[in-house]
Amino acid sequence: MRFLDPSLLWYLPLGALPVLIHLLFSPKPVRLEFSSVFLLQPVMRARRRPARLLQALILLLRCLAVLALVSAFSKPVLESGPLSRLPGLAAGAGRPLSLVVLADRSYSMSAAFGGRTRYAFAAGGAESILGALGKEDEAALAFFDETAETAADWSTDFGGISKILSASRPGYRGTSYAKGLEKAYALLAARPAGRKKAVLVLSDSARNGFDGFPADLSALPAYDPQVSLLGFSFDDSPNSWVRELKGRTGAANALELAAYTGGENGGGEAELTGFTAAGASGRTAAGRFRNGAAAFDLRALGPDPAGRVELADRDALALDNAAYFAFQWAAPREPRVLTLYGGERDLRPGGSAYFIKKFFEAGSGPGRAPFRADFASYAGDGARLGDYGAVILAGPPAEARWAKAVKEYLSGGGGVLLLALPGGDSPGAAPGGFWETFGLKSAGLLDGKFSLAQARDAAFFAGEDFSGFDLSRAAAGRLAALEGAAEETPWSFRDEAGLNYPALLSKRQGKGRLLVWTSSFDLGSSDLPAKPVFAPFMALNMKKLFGLAEPEPRSAPLGGLYQGRLKSADRARVAVTAPDGARSYVYSEGGVFKYGLTALPGLYRWSAPPEAGVFAVNLDHGKGESALPAAKRPPWRILRPEEPAEDFRSALYGVELGQALLFLTLAFFLAEFLLSRKAL
């Protein structure tokens, strides 16, 4: 409580005047004879007690009336408590005001509220408040999200500030109240100390904005305890959003996109039924729902698919209902596999070709590959390697002509799995110069007891898990000692002394890929085909031969850096077109270009003739901006949205109690008058 005219408080002792008058002019006691006193004493005692209580009450009312009257003319102001929010009783401005309007432009301010966005509603309240400021007041405008910036320096042109505020729109970043308040305190620190200072926070008090916020406001730079913090808050709103997109190789070796949601207050998994996916060309992808995600087959969108996934159902915040995808991916080759073998024994139980045939006959169950397989002997003349997407050589061929045919097939982009050891009735060695054709060299055969081991951290196993198999139980008794330049050795053999030898070699050959298994699938050389790990082992090899590695995403987070690659290593100018049509240019170095102007979510198209591509930029949901519930106790005083200007003045300057005290004075005098008549 403060008094606008404290000089009148010197009249408060007048409240004791009725007490003095009562003591000086009260009737003196009457003397009575002893006998009279003796007879009337009980009667006097019985009547004196209520009379004294009545007189005391009248005296109290007179004192309270005088005190209330003097206090009323002193213009008291209540600055806190429930009564300070009474409308229509706002106190006068007093000192001139320096006000910072701090506007939140995070994307949660795009949420719907009362037929408008939260930002538009808060901006309208600020316009009403700015219109009620006095001639000696001043204001400044600052915007904030994850950063803060000054939009309008100190000015008395409140209409101009309102125009800047109403013309702006929320962006696509998260919220940091610490950054915003730091900017506001810094602006107020430069104003004279004699002015009243306040910050009007135009935000939704979102909970995520207080992540990393100090427990004590005094920890903020330039903090001033005399600065009043006032702001808005909004009711919780149900909201759902596209939380994550993942590309993966699905059934039938097709590119599949899995879309996941997040939700708050009733949103989330129930919204999966509203998913749609469309490519950049406008074609729609078919989808189904599995394991809590919407899964879309992107084959219909063609190679290197790009587009958006969207929740069809409407909610409070439409901005986060869509997410964008772009992948580097090409449709697989014809899913046909040719297996070449040396002799009929290879097709009998226990032979290499026999186990390969059993693998393909198992179909597309767990760990299997959905390919069609043909089998032919090296001695036949009808097999054309170019008709197949992959070729398996169940042992090296005896004729040199096959080495040339396989090399040409690899150069054209085919995939070959070659078993280094032949079957039981096949020729014992490859023809001269065979291994040299593929950049390898044979150092003879090794006999012994070898167990299988998986190389750690090999890129070959990306997205695969073999931890459930006891690989040490897969043994080999004979293997070929091959030497040469291989990109990777994902599988190894280990002898009883702990020495390692290559089990599978992986290398590029022309445009294709060559995999060499240094042993055989014949039970006379290895028992791998009789182990549970054989099926997933073969399925992984087929994926590598067909180029079915997991799709490479082309994406960057909002505000992040995208790094693209060109086929040419020459320096080139790359034109990038943003979702809003703005075009900018960057240069590639060594076939790599970097682009950082990712301020908008959507699809960005780049062009460096003859090459072109697309990459996606999405909102960062790790900061929780899509969850709309407000903080229970923000550090500012909440203004009621229906009367923002009146509530602002009441909250800032308090409430004048003069009128209420005058009514109270009248009530005291009236009560004293009625009691006095009763006393008479």
Image (cartoon, rainbow, N blue to C red):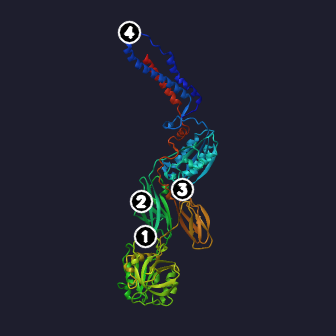
Instruction: Please say if the residues under marks 4 and 3 sit with CB atoms less than 8 Å apart.
Output: no
Near mark 4 (Cα within 10 A), the count class, few <14, some 14-19 or many ≥20, is few
Disc marking residue 417: none
* Amino acid type of the residue that numbered disc 2 sits on in the rendered structure: Leu
Q: Nearer the viewer, residue 510 or 680?
A: 680
Report which residue position mark 4 lands on: 35
| Residue linked to disc 1 | 250
N-term mark: 4 or 2: 4
The span from disc 4 to disc 2 (Cα, nearest Å) is: 104 Å
| Residue denoted by label 2 | 272
Residue 361: % across, % down: 36, 78
Q: CA distance from mark 3 to mark 1?
A: 34 Å
For marks 1 and 2, the one nearer the N-term is 1
Q: CA distance from mark 4 to mark 3?
A: 99 Å
As helix, strand or loop, the secondary structure at mark 2 comes to helix
Specify the quadrant that holds the N terminus.
top right
Residue under label 3: 173
Mark found first going from the N terminus, 3 or 1: 3
Q: Residues within 10 Å of mark 3 (few under 14, many from 20)?
A: many
Distance (Cα) linking label 1 and label 2: 19 Å
- Secondary element at tag 3: loop
Residue at the extreme left of the image, as rendered: 349
